């Protein structure tokens, strides 16, 4: 683009210079030929008056010495009849043009034709035609074009070199900005800043990006604070409502009223789960999610959790396949149970109309690998990473199936803090969630702000 602009501007500038130069040469040439015609005319006055053709021819033949570039010359009397003429040796005979505009000058391809009046005592008594060769103009044109072409090539070269030197600097910074923006979009980590101390438009763009990220972080912080405070404040009244409902349930004997209390209890339980999740999110955000590490047999925990969960889930059959046998891990038992419950309830929630959820786990030298498979709606490939982000729900389900998009975010954090991994795969119908836990009694990673 830069090269194109430079070449365009230079071409216009050179074209203006060349045209002006050629025009000024033409003006000078016309002036000088006219002054020769003037002299010839003045000298021919008496020859015209006395009809002395020989003398007129003599005057014209002198032109051969004075101005050898004159190819043809002619003197016409006041009636326009040829009085005397001259043709440079070797040149064609001069044909007087029919259009005899006195005082005119006409440029042809290689010649200039001047028609100058012969004036005596304010009366035109004839006119002089001079046809002049313009080889010099052709040469001037040729050399100007050559110089222009050379200068253009040089300018093009310079422009290319400057462009090549500046381009990487500009594109490197733009690409860095683009890469960081993509990373931020993918990871949701708005703490990424870009340092740049330039003063150009790209620096302004980078500053705007940094300010925008700062603003996003501030807003996020406010939102996290609000979630933390709100969920904390909800917890006490909710515990109290739950207590009163349990009491009511015990005290009430009327079946109809008992059913209403049961409905209220179920909804309060839902609310309790949500508030617990929000509190966990708030703890994760502030780095306060604590782990109570202990050594326990995970084989036992999985079996117990499945058994308890099966009682609450009449719609699906939880099938245990391929167990590992006794396997000890060093982990937070309650939190691992929370992960299991979350994945199991998702497997049931997102496979409506299906009958089975399959659980299997095996150990290798270093890890315990747990897999929970359902045959439900599955997850599109492009969404498999996003579902572990907080508040993320896949596009098509959010309307049909209730949820807040917090469970997997919490699971991922818990597993990460245990030095494990969590991921999802899809095989034909439904999806399989996996997570790993190290079998070695490693210390968990230190609490860190996520
Ligand atoms: P919630 O279920 O409350 O929306 P989660 O964090 O547990 O929140 O899940 C996040 C999103 O991941 C869900 O909204 C859903 O779109 C998708 N998802 C989770 N588990 C499954 C599953 N087993 N099958 C299909 N989609 C799932």
Image: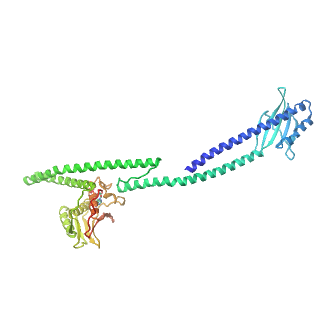
The reply to whether residue 256 is visible in this rendering is no
Q: Position of residue 73 (x, y in %)?
A: 84, 39
Residue 236 position, x and y percent, is: 16, 50
Q: Ligand 1 quadrant?
A: bottom left
- In the image, 179 versus 433, the foreground residue is 179
Q: Determine whether, in the image, residue 313 is placed left or right of residue 387.
A: left
Colour style of the rendered protein structure? rainbow
Compare residues 429 and 73 and report the one nearer the observer. Answer: 73
- Left/right of residue 443 with respect to residue 109 in the rendered view: left
Total numbered badges shown on the rendered structure: 0
The image shows residue 344, relative to residue 54, as above or below, that is: below
Tell me what residue is drawn at x 81 percent, y 40 percent: 131
Q: Which residue lies most toward the top here?
A: 121
Q: Nearer the viewer, residue 448 or 174?
A: 448
Q: Pick the residue in front: 306 or 75.
A: 75
Q: Position of residue 181 (x, y in %)?
A: 40, 53
Q: Please state, as top left, top right, bottom left or bottom right, where the C terminus lies in the image.
A: bottom left
Q: Is residue 28 above or below residue 305?
A: above
Residue 111 visible in the picture: yes
Using the image, determine if residue 435 lies above or below residue 253.
below
Q: Residue at x 65, y 45 (%)?
A: 14
Horizontal side, residue 253 vs residue 423: left or right: left
Q: Residue 288: image x %, image y %?
A: 24, 56
Asked which quadrant contains residue 358, the reply is: bottom left
Q: Residue at x 49, y 54 (%)?
A: 169
């Amino acid at each position: 683009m830069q090269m194109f602009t430079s070449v365009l501007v230079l071409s216009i500038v050179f074209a203006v210079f060349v045209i002006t130069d050629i025009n000024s040469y033409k003006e000078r040439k016309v002036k000088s030929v006219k002054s020769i015609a003037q002299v010839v005319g003045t000298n021919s006055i008496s020859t015209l008056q006395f009809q002395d053709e020989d003398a007129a021819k003599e005057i014209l033949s002198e032109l051969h010495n004075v101005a050898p570039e004159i190819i043809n010359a002619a003197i016409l009397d006041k009636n326009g009849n040829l009085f005397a003429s001259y043709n440079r040796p070797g040149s064609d005979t001069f044909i007087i043009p029919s259009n005899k505009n006195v005082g005119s000058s006409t440029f042809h391809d290689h010649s200039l034709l001047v028609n100058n009046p012969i004036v005596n005592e304010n009366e035109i008594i004839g006119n002089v035609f001079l046809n002049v060769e313009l080889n010099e103009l052709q040469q001037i044109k040729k050399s100007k074009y050559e110089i222009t072409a050379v200068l253009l090539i040089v300018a093009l070269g310079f422009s290319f070199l400057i462009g090549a030197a500046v381009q990487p600097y500009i594109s490197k910074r733009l690409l860095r900005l683009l890469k960081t923006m993509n990373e931020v979009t993918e990871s949701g980590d708005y703490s990424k800043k870009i340092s740049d101390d330039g003063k150009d438009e790209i620096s302004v763009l980078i500053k705007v990006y940094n300010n925008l990220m700062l603003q996003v972080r501030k807003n996020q912080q406010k939102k996290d604070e609000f979630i933390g405070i709100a969920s904390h404040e909800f917890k006490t009244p909710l515990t109290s409502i739950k207590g009163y409902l349990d009491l009511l349930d015990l005290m009430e004997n009327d079946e109809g009223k008992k059913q209403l209390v049961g409905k209220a209890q179920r909804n309060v339980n839902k609310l309790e789960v949500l508030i617990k999740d929000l509190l966990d999110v708030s703890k994760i955000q502030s780095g306060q999610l604590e782990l109570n590490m202990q050594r326990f047999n995970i084989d036992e925990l999985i079996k117990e959790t499945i058994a308890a969960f099966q009682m609450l889930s009449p719609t699906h059959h939880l099938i245990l396949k391929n167990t590992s046998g006794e396997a000890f891990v060093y982990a937070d038992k309650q939190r691992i149970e929370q992960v299991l419950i979350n994945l199991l309830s998702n497997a049931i929630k997102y496979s409506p109309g299906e009958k089975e959820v399959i659980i299997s786990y095996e150990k290798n030298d270093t890890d315990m690998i747990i897999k929970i498979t359902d045959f439900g709606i599955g997850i599109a490939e492009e969404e498999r990473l996003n579902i572990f982000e907080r508040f993320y729900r896949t596009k098509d389900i959010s309307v049909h199936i209730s949820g807040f998009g917090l469970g997997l975010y919490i699971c991922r954090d818990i597993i990460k803090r245990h030095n494990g991994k969590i991921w999802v795969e899809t095989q034909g119908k439904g999806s399989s969630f996996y997570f790993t836990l190290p079998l070695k009694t490693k210390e968990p990673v230190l609490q860190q702000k996520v």
